[in-house]
Amino acid sequence: MNGTDKPIGYWLKHLHNLIDEQFDATLGDLGLDRRQWQILNVLSGATRSRGEMEQALAPFWPDGVPQLEAALDGADGLVTRGWVGYDADALTLTEQGRAAHGAAAERVGETRLLLLRGLTPEQYAETVRILSVMADNLEAALAGRAADGKQD
């Protein structure tokens, strides 16, 4: 039995779980999980409101609902550690947060290289393109179904 005997849903879920596990192994000793890394990475580009953060991170969180409070304000939260500061609704990386992001970014880059080993840039781009088309197909079908349901 080879890998093509399993459906795409299996491989998508399996890969997602492995990526989470690899992030835990890669960033665990820095006290970061994958979701906190995503917050640091988004904030490395610009200051964001909580609403902007939730929108940017929604696709990566279970059920599409970011749990920012735990990631930011919990016992091991990024604000608690002094890596993220906020003023009113604006979240930004502190100097310590930028240093933590830099250390984590190097490791994440190594993880990405590991993930893509054996693939050409063209193969990666084609894989992403194919997955995007599949997602577009299902989004269109679901939107059509929802529109049909509203007409009833």
Image: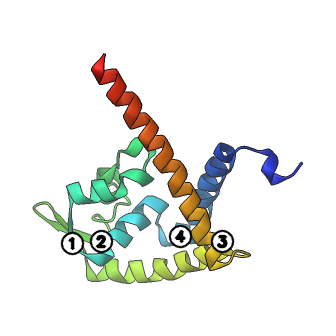
The single residue placed furthest to the top in the displayed view is 152
**Which element is circle 4 on?**
helix
Q: Which residue is mark 2?
A: 43
For the residues bearing labels 2 and 1, Cβ distance under 8 angstroms: yes
Amino acid type at image mark 3: Gln
Q: Nearer the viewer, mark 3 or mark 2?
A: 3
Question: Which residue is found at the position 62% from the left and 76% from the top?
Answer: 122
- The residue pinned by badge 3 equals 123
Q: Name the mark nearer the viewer: 4 or 1.
A: 1
Picture coordinates of residue 110, whole percent (x, y): 60, 79
Rendered position, 91 above or below 54: below
- In three-dimensional space, the C-alpha distance between marks 4 and 3, rounded to whole angstroms, equals 27 Å
Residue 93 lies, with reference to residue 10, above or below; the image says below
Residue 68: where, in percent of width, then height? 31, 53
Kind of residue sitting beneath label 1: Thr
In the picture of the structure, the residue carrying the numbered disc 1 is 47
Q: Position of residue 90 (x, y in %)?
A: 16, 65
From the viewer's perspective, is 126 left or right of 67?
A: right
